[in-house]
Image (cartoon, rainbow, N blue to C red):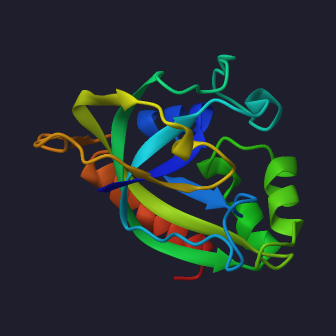
Amino acid sequence: MASGFKEWQVVCDALASGRQAIILRKGGIHEGKAGFSFAEENFFLFPTRFHNQDQFVREGTVVAAPEWVAGDTVSITHYCEALWAKTLTDWEQVAALEPYHVWTEETIRQRFDWEGKGMASGSIHVALVRVSALVKPWEFPYEAKYGGCRSWVTLPEPPVGTRAGAEPVLGDDCFSTLFAKLGEILGE
């Protein structure tokens, strides 16, 4: 089986375009008692349609779409490899990441300050991901088990060769530069 990481469509678009290569996450209300973690090193981006996404991002095109319903066709176009994941507790470090994502400061601050489901106030998870575009979209029918406010979903087994020929959206030089800049911000 394959892992899918649920993220707002507008953020998936930013990751797919190379505009963003980090994921900031506090977790969903269905993450369980232990709370959220970057449980998978390799995963497919699963775009979500819910939430009023345009209120929470500084840029990107938000296309209003109805919630997924059973039988809708899900189109997976990108695969990610998490190179590192950290829990940040210093707001100044989190604020310094602003040029590297599309969320508003208010959105990130609310997530940082939220407490519950095993997650402490004054913290947020960040991961650096290498995003690759699939040569051909992987499509399958939406099922109710993909719903709910959770970050990780188990997807069906992808067709053989789904990841073959996938190309990173950021070239090696660009990604190396980004890796170094993020290291400076986070004191690495």
Seen from the viewer's position, the closer of residues 147 and 61 is: 147
Please tell me which residue is depicted at 64% across the width and 29% down the height of the picture.
Answer: 49
Q: Nearer the viewer, residue 95 or 110?
A: 110
Question: Observer-nearest residue: 14 or 144?
Answer: 144
Image quadrant in which you'd find residue 132: top left
In front: 116, or 177? 116
**Residue located at (83% from left, 32% from top):** 55
Report if residue 18 is visible in the image.
Answer: no
Q: Is residue 90 above or below residue 83?
A: below
Name the residue: 44% across, 68% down: 180
Q: Is residue 1 left or right of residue 63?
A: left
Does residue 97 lie above or below 64 as drawn? below
Q: Position of residue 101 (x, y in %)?
A: 62, 47
- x then y, percent, for residue 117: 78, 73
- For the point 41% across and 67% down, the residue is 40
Q: Quadrant of the N terminus?
A: bottom left
171 left or right, relative to 49: left
Count of marks overlaid on the render: 0
Residue 81 found in image quarter: bottom left
Q: Position of residue 35 (x, y in %)?
A: 68, 73
Relative image position of residue 150 (x, y in whole percent): 63, 55
Image quadrant assignment for residue 82: bottom left
Taking the image as drawn, is residue 73 in sight? yes
